[in-house]
């Protein structure tokens, strides 16, 4: 029998944190519950969790700051934000600093569990995927490294890497916008769509040294990477 997935849960609302912890444990997860960002960071460094579920608004160290600190150490561990915020900029900021998903409160446990499994499966895919070539670039998906002509290497974020992976795998085909939003963001709502546009812009800039490569916006359908 496989070992349970170890989750670090950082939530300062004691009652909510306990409910989430107990609900996840009934589904055979191992949950490390922390009530503030400082304790969560210390626990992350000593307990080696497989995924982080972080409340955004916490004392001592908020979820965004905690994620930034974690990303200085580990570029690949999945991070889910729990937030009462619904402003587009807040959501985009969460993804930009290295978050992989977010859930707006209140949320269902079933939805959280599905997103946890999706992120764990994506991480497993990343660890077993091959090195890919696109134009004059080499893309090491497992290490999230994009190299131009063996000269300049860029470190991609987790979400940039997964988005580029799917674009390359569907090279010269339209990547369905709704499908990829649901696959990588867990939803195709307005906030996720705005976030995806930001990441597409970032990838265009990182691929600009080979002017044969284009990421086209196919209006009403999605994106297409061409070489």
Image (tube, helix red, strand yellow):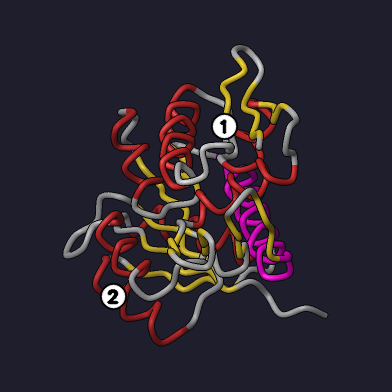
- Asked if 103 appears above or below 116 in the picture, the reply is above
Q: Earlier in the sequence, mark 2 or mark 1?
A: 2
Q: Residue at x 67, y 56 (%)?
A: 133
User: Is 105 placed left or right of 188 in the picture?
Assistant: left
Q: What is the secondary structure assignment of the residue under circle 1?
A: strand
In reply to whether residue 27 is colored magenta, the answer given is: no
Q: Quadrant of the C terminus?
A: top right
The image shows residue 141 at horizontal and vertical percentages of 62, 62
Quadrant of the rendered structure where residue 222 is?
Answer: top right
- Asked if 128 appears above or below 23 in the picture, the reply is below
Foreground label between 2 and 1: 1
- Asked whether the viewer can see residue 65, the reply is yes
Label 2: which residue?
Answer: 39
Provide the major secondary structure of the magenta segment: helix
* Mark 2 Cα shell of 10 Å, populated few (<14), some (14-19), many (≥20): some
Q: Which residues are magenta?
A: 108-130
Q: Nearer the viewer, residue 117 or 28?
A: 117
Q: Residue at x 36, y 42 (%)?
A: 83
The image shows residue 79 at horizontal and vertical percentages of 47, 58
* Mark 1 Cα shell of 10 Å, populated few (<14), some (14-19), many (≥20): some
Alpha carbon of mark 2 to alpha carbon of mark 1: how far?
42 Å
The image shows residue 104 at horizontal and vertical percentages of 43, 37
Number of the label disc, if any, that sits on residue 117:
none
Label 1: which residue?
Answer: 215
User: Is 59 placed left or right of 120 in the picture?
Assistant: left
């Amino acid at each position: 029998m496989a070992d349970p997935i170890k989750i670090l849960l950082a939530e300062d609302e004691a009652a909510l944190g306990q409910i989430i912890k107990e609900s996840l444990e009934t589904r055979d997860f191992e949950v490390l519950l922390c009530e503030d960002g400082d304790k969560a960071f210390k626990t992350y460094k000593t307990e080696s969790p497989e995924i982080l579920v972080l409340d955004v608004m916490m004392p001592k160290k908020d979820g965004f700051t905690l994620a930034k600190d974690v990303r200085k150490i580990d570029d690949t561990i999945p991070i889910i934000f729990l937030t009462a915020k619904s402003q587009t900029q807040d959501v985009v900021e969460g993804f930009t600093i290295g978050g992989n998903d977010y859930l707006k409160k209140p949320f269902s446990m079933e939805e959280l569990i599905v997103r946890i499994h999706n992120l764990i499966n994506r991480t497993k895919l990343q660890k077993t995927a091959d090195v890919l070539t696109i134009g004059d670039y080499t893309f090491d998906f497992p290490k999230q490294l994009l190299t131009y002509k063996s000269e300049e290497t860029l470190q991609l974020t987790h979400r940039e890497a997964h988005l580029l992976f799917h674009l390359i795998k569907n090279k010269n085909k339209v990547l369905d916008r709704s499908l990829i939003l649901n696959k990588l963001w867990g939803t195709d709502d307005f906030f996720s769509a705005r976030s995806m546009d930001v990441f597409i812009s970032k990838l265009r800039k990182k691929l600009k040294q080979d002017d044969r490569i284009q990421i086209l916006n196919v209006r009403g359908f999605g994106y297409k990477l061409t070489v």
